[in-house]
Image (cartoon, grey):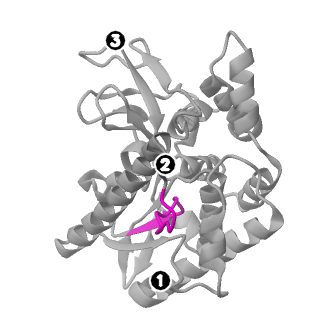
Amino acid sequence: MSININDNEKRIGLALSGGGFRAAAFHLGVFRKLKELGLLWNIDLLTCVSGGSIAGAFLASHWGDDTALDKLDNYLRTSSIAVSSVIGGIFDPFSTRLEKLAETYERDLFGQDTLSTLKDGPRLYLNATNLATGNMFFFVAGGNDLVEMGEWELGTSSAGQFKISKAVAASSAFPPVFPPLRIDQKDYPAAGVDYVTLTDGGVYDNLGVNPLLRKRNALDYVIVSDAGKPFDMDEHPTESGTAVLTESIGILMEQVRGLQFKRLELSANEGGPKPLWFSINSDKGERHSGDAVFASSIKTNLKRLNSAEMTVLDRHAGALLTHRLENYTPELLNFD
């Protein structure tokens, strides 16, 4: 999958940030705009975190099917899974809250499909955080290539029979609401550890930028759709000791966001892929005044979104993407 620009084949990667159902709906707006422009089914690589993994994995599992966008839209308007998963995990002695979360994804989105079923779609990374090493842990499939899970320090192993629903649950297991996913030696035979535990990919990097810059993926353009929670000025900052932990996580995520955008810029200056990025709180390119404020005020949980929220998220994502394409990579609007 690639596009032709001036008789040269060019490959595009798309990163989908975390941010719950808000992020999934924002990325859906990106998908719709890319489809309108004829680019969607030519994306070569998707790298996804948390809420972005919900949207990205669903798209990859329905690759080439235009009706997938409306199906995802309906799911985000009608489903609320966080509360049921938490309560179910508390009262069920045989399942954790995370297992309940995976079961909802299995029931409503992915069925029994495993990562091996994604072989004909784009290269797909579903990113989590490995609490054994502090590294990004990925599940990677698609692109008619190897299906693996692992990380740079402990290595990788085959993951063809790993369920998509379980990989997405690991990527979106936001602490402390959901406990981490445990993977034992029999499924991930890494040297030096008896097992690993995986939590939300946003703990390591809420943007999922790393796979975009790997030489093995050889991309020419990279697009980063950032629907995460922006850290805004607070006129009444907390004085509570317990709330400081939550605010600290937000500050750390903001630091990582800035560093990753800088990495994209530096990589491009050194001959790497040409980057485009946009964040949900940006008003640069918004179609209607106030869209950025409204969109970024929507909560980043896993509860269904109402019509007004879906409309603004769709419109704002498409507008920001269009603005960046027109101003920085107009050639992507005129490919063969």
Considering only vertical position in the picture, is 153 above or below 294?
Answer: above
Front residue (pair 237, 7) = 237
Find disc 1 in the rendering and name its residue: 325
Q: Residue 40 in the image: x percent, y percent?
A: 57, 67
124 displayed left or right of 111: left
The CA span between labels 2 and 1 is 23 Å
Q: Residue 116 in the image: x percent, y percent?
A: 53, 34
Q: How would you rate the neighbour count of disc 2 (Cα within 10 Å): few for under 14, some for 14-19, many for 20 or more?
A: many
Query: Can I make out residue 201 in this image?
Result: no
Q: Quadrant of residue 151?
A: top left
SS category of the residue bearing label 1: helix
The CA span between labels 3 and 2 is 25 Å
Disc marking residue 194: 3
Front residue (pair 24, 232) = 232
Q: For the magenta stretch, what is the residue range?
A: 222-237
Q: Looking at numbered disc 3 in the image, what kind of residue is underneath it?
A: Asp
Q: Looking at numbered disc 1 in the image, what kind of residue is underneath it?
A: Leu
Callout 3–callout 1 Cβ contact below 8 Å: no
| Residue drawn where x is 56% and y is 38% of the image | 168
Q: Residue 313 in the image: x percent, y percent?
A: 67, 69
Q: Looking at numbered disc 2 in the image, what kind of residue is underneath it?
A: Val
332 displayed left or right of 192: right
Callout 3–callout 2 Cβ contact below 8 Å: no
Q: Residue 150 in the image: x percent, y percent?
A: 35, 31
